[in-house]
Image: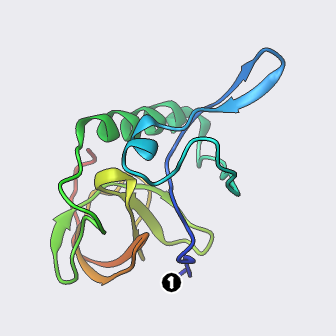
Amino acid sequence: MIEIPDSLRSVFSAQLEERDGSYVVDIPASEIEHDTLAANETYRVALLASESSTGQKAQQEQPQSAAQETTPTSDGPPVDEDEVRDVMIETTGDQGDGIAKVERGYVVIVPGGQPGDAPTVEIDQVQENVAFASIVAHDSRAL
């Protein structure tokens, strides 16, 4: 599994846009609303290329619309250890593990998951900014 530092504040998908001679990545309003990030603060940013340019637009639109529909009900991670839930693998990490996002953009690392998979997973380990899960059932349909 990949190691995710506790200092990781946020993971989301966005499109790089040109505006007035500069390139801009919009931060979803939900990141500010949920106190994940604060305006007028400085953050270190990492950019990862999408797996395919053809599916890129659809992948970017899905997390943004999902983030707008969810509202937090409590502080802390939105998952619990031993919880079983369905997820959508959006991309893969540097070491090939599947990466899914759930409520508030919270990241779930799923070894063996591939982009487009929609497995049922069991949450094995929960940290403040990321959880690790195991696949318990594969779903033959993509969401």
Q: Amino acid at mark 1?
A: Met
Of residues 90 and 64, the one nearer the viewer is: 64
List the residue tagged with mark 1.
1
Res. 44 image quadrant: bottom right
Q: In the rendered picture of this protein, how many numbered marks are placed on residues? A: 1
Residue 45 image position (x, y, % from top left): 69, 54
Q: Secondary structure at mark 1?
A: loop
> Viewed as shown, does residue 71 lie left or right of 101?
left
Of residues 112 and 81, the one nearer the viewer is: 81
Residue 117 image position (x, y, % from top left): 34, 57
The local crowd at label 1, few if under 14, some if 14 to 19, many if 20 or more residues have their Cα within 10 Å, is few
Q: Residue furthest top?
A: 20
Residue at the (53%, 47%) spot, across then down: 38
Residue at the (18%, 83%) spot, across then down: 82
Res. 15 image quadrant: top right
Residue at the (55%, 71%) spot, across then down: 96
> Viewed as shown, does residue 13 lie left or right of 104?
right
> Viewed as shown, does residue 51 lie left or right of 106?
right
Residue 84 image position (x, y, % from top left): 15, 73
Res. 76 image quadrant: bottom left
* Quadrant where the image shows the C terminus: top left
* Figure colour scheme: rainbow
Residue 71 image position (x, y, % from top left): 22, 44
